[in-house]
Amino acid sequence: MQNGLLDSLRRLSDADLVAGVKGLVARERVATAELVAHLAELDTRDVHLREGYSSLFVYCRDALGLSEAEAYTRIEVARAARRFPKILDMLAAGSVSLTAARLLAPHLTPANHREVLESARGKRKTEVEVIVAKLAPRPDVPASVRRLAAPAPRVLDLAAPLAPTPAPECAPASGPVEPIAISAPPIRPAAVAPLAPDRYKLQVTISGGTLEKLRAAQDMLGHAVPSADEAAIIDRALSALLVELSRKRFAATSRPRASCGPKPGARRPSAEVKRAVWRRDLGRCAFVGPGGHRCDARRFVEFHHVDPYALGGEASVDQIQLRCRRHNDYEGRLYFGRRRRGELVPEQVEPRDAPNVRSRPAARPEGSGPTRAPEDPGSRRTAT
Ligand SMILES: [Zn+2]
């Protein structure tokens, strides 16, 4: 189809081609304004949470396929447009760009928004940045002169194409580099880079002491890992570290007794249950939307009763899952909202009534709020 389109465009006159471009730009502006308006409304609902995304940003990126920058800009402008709908009109008319609106958004107030938006009419990004600088002056940037490391000479060894080649940390990959630069931020290569499905390159700089630990582990694992493969050693080390961290994190307030398990009727999960749940869910939100998308957010996760405690849900490994703060709140609001409206009373709840999760154990909320681990710094309720 696109080949056919290109063929047909080649036959257009210049005037028709320009008219077509102008028409498309106008349509794109209108579509952008409408998209921003839709996002503004979506932002007031729980749609993204229900679908298994921890934020509107993650939903825009992963479900709608926007780039990070596209998602960020549109959401910022959408939130501003909810307060100042004039932005939508100006976007649709092409009077301000999305970028300009995003730059201005944090500085708009009910008192100044008309004047500020008008002052940005038709302005380019650099001109809008001048307007922002007037609205919110910032202190001077101190001058800095730093010596950057010269790149190590790179020798391409064709006999060993897979051997790791140290990348220069602070300079472009090729060419001679002036060792003195003014305020030039160091260029850090990506620490983790995907190579192939389920294969990643991890590049780290370690101290001599860490290297000694790695060598010692390789020696001690000589029978289990005869190849002394660093990746296998690191995997074992991280597995042991996760066990250790979960043990420390969830042992402080409970007396862990390996044999006791969850007490019938116990509301709060025991430390043993917390450790097992944390390891099983890999410390991530286990909420799964109806389309099968798992949230997987890592920040501010809480322990969540699959079956509300009020309905007899036990604090057992099967009945506890990790949730991010937003999904815990979301499920709590669903439960309490329905109960307040008289649509749901505990005695009537059946597993099939779970509002969101089909492919996992029912994801109904805990009847009386999330069970959080006070010793877990990740459980603090801080905006994500
Ligand atoms: Zn979540």
Image (cartoon, rainbow, N blue to C red):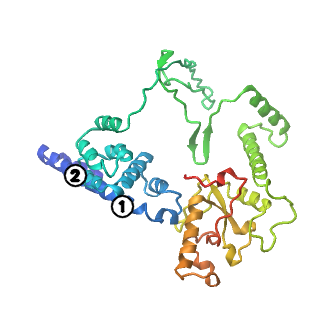
Front residue (pair 310, 193): 310
Q: Is residue 1 left or right of residue 145?
A: left
Marks 2 and 1 sit apart, C-alpha to C-alpha, by 17 Å
Residue 4 can be seen in this image:
no
**Percent x, y of residue 241:** 76, 45
What is the x, y in percent for residue 48? 48, 62
Nearest to N terminus: mark 2 or mark 1: 1
Q: Is residue 162 left or right of residue 115?
A: right
Q: Amino acid at mark 2?
A: Ala
Q: Which residue is mark 1?
A: 38
> Measured along the vertical axis of the image, is residue 331 above or below residue 71?
below
- Where 190 falls versus 81 (above or below)? above
For disc 2, the neighbor class at 10 Å (few under 14, some 14 to 19, many from 20) is some
**Nearest to the observer: residue 187 or residue 120:** 120
- Residue matched to label 2: 93
Q: Where is residue 222 shown, x and y percent of the image?
A: 84, 38
